[in-house]
Image: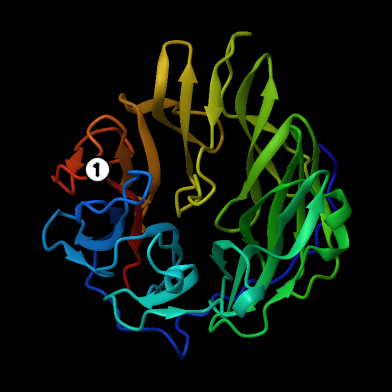
């Protein structure tokens, strides 16, 4: 892993934006559910976006239009949701959308006509004024593959979309992931046959800085205060979780194992593994007798413990760091649990597939 050149900036998080929608009641969760029973032409389940109180009461369908929704993200002020959508029956649902947390104001913000391409992975900027995303609208070529994605930034209303990865396109592979933002800069990663490269770039595309490069380190996620980075390192035939400061002068292994192929994974880059207070990290373990179980560890490497003993996908921390959401793979329900692994609560209690939860911020 290379040393990094870091510019220290003052982060100002805007508490509200002029286009923010109505605020929800405290302790609510938005999620995807297949309970409408709709399927695509291949028999795959289609979903709607729902909202539910964190105690499992008052479930509301926000979209009423089953489609392939993904990458739900709450705006920093908590009033809007951005998401990707594609529909097997309507081209109108294809692209990136925003809506208020009560389901009103649904607006498609990628509107580039025949040149729109495929758009995905929207990520709000810290002040809520911009959205980073991936798009193949320019038809970039990698090897024999045509139309591979680049990284773009647009205003929150969809205006002024522009390519911000152009200066490093020759070093990018066909797989591109927007990992988030760091002090007003976009963080993205590309995989070239198992070799990962991660960049930090200004929202106008200038000053692209290489953070990670190689086959061992990947999926870096900045801490809430921006002072540390957690990432996955490939070693001893498995994956381990490490944390370092942004100057890469203090490397701490959070998980250690004998040389067996155990994978400690930050599985879904849609969710930060950091607790909002920056004290703990959640990860999934697979191998060595574990099957996609969820674990938690303090940022100094102490307090390692299993909190979900069944196969599950992590779905994010509550804003106050007191609970976590997860999707149980076997029963396809949405659950929450406290960081000690106690007081599990089935939030959805429905035979459909419920997943991809997002906590709605308390304001």
- Image check: 233 left or right of 289? right
Q: Which residue does the image show at 47% across and 21% down from the upper left?
A: 286
- Image check: 337 left or right of 124? left
Residue 320, placed above or below residue 269: below
Q: Quadrant of residue 104?
A: bottom left
Q: Which residue does the image show at 67% across and 74% down from the upper left?
A: 115
Q: Quadrant of residue 242?
A: top right
Residue 176, placed above or below residue 186: above
Image quadrant where one finds the N terminus = top right
- For label 1, the residue is 335
Q: Position of residue 93 (x, y in %)?
A: 42, 70
Q: Quadrant of residue 21?
A: bottom left
Residue reaching furthest to the top:
259
Q: Secondary structure at mark 1?
A: strand
Q: Which residue does the image show at 48% across and 67% down from the upper left?
A: 94
Q: Is residue 285 visible?
A: yes
Q: Position of residue 136 (x, y in %)?
A: 68, 62
- Image check: 196 left or right of 13? right
Q: Position of residue 208 (x, y in %)?
A: 83, 61
The colour scheme used here is: rainbow
Local crowd at mark 1 within 10 Å, few (<14), some, or many (≥20)?
Answer: many
Q: How many discs mark residues in the rendered view?
A: 1
Image quadrant where one finds the C terminus = bottom left
Q: Is residue 184 visible?
A: no
Q: Position of residue 218 (x, y in %)?
A: 69, 38
Residue 359, placed above or below residue 129: above
Residue 333, placed above or below residue 14: above
């Amino acid at each position: 892993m290379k040393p990094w050149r870091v510019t220290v900036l003052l982060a100002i998080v805007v508490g509200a934006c002029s286009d923010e929608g109505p605020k929800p009641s405290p302790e609510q969760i938005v999620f995807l559910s297949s309970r409408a029973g709709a399927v695509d032409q291949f028999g795959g389940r289609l979903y709607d976006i729902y909202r539910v109180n964190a105690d499992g009461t008052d479930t509301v369908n926000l979209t009423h239009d089953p489609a392939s929704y993904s990458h739900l993200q709450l705006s920093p002020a908590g009033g809007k949701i951005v998401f990707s959508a594609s529909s097997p029956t309507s081209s109108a649902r294809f692209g990136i959308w925003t809506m208020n947390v009560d389901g009103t104001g649904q607006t498609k913000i990628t509107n580039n006509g025949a040149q729109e391409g495929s758009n995905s992975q929207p990520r709000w900027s810290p002040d809520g004024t911009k959205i980073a995303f991936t798009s193949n609208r320019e038809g970039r070529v990698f090897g024999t593959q045509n139309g591979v994605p680049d990284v773009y930034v647009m205003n929150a209303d969809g205006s002024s979309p522009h390519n911000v990865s152009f200066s490093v396109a020759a070093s990018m592979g066909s797989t591109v992931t927007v990992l988030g933002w760091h002090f007003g800069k976009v963080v993205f990663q590309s995989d070239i046959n198992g070799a990962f490269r991660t960049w930090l770039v200004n929202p106008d595309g200038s000053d692209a800085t290489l953070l990670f490069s190689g086959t061992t380190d990947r999926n870096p996620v900045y801490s809430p205060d921006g002072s540390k980075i957690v990432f996955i390192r490939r070693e001893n035939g498995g994956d381990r979780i490490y944390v370092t400061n942004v100057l890469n002068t203090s490397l701490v292994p959070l998980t250690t194992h004998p040389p067996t192929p155990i994978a400690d994974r930050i599985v879904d880059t849609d969710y930060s593994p950091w607790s909002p207070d920056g004290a703990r990290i959640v990860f999934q373990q697979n191998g060595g007798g574990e099957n996609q179980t969820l674990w938690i560890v303090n940022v100094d490497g102490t307090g390692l413990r299993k909190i979900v003993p069944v196969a599950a996908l992590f779905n994010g921390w509550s804003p106050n760091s007191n609970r976590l959401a997860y999707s149980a793979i076997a029963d396809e329900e949405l659950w929450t649990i406290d960081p000690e692994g106690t007081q599990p609560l089935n939030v959805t209690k429905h035979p459909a597939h419920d997943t991809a939860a997002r906590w709605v911020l308390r304001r």
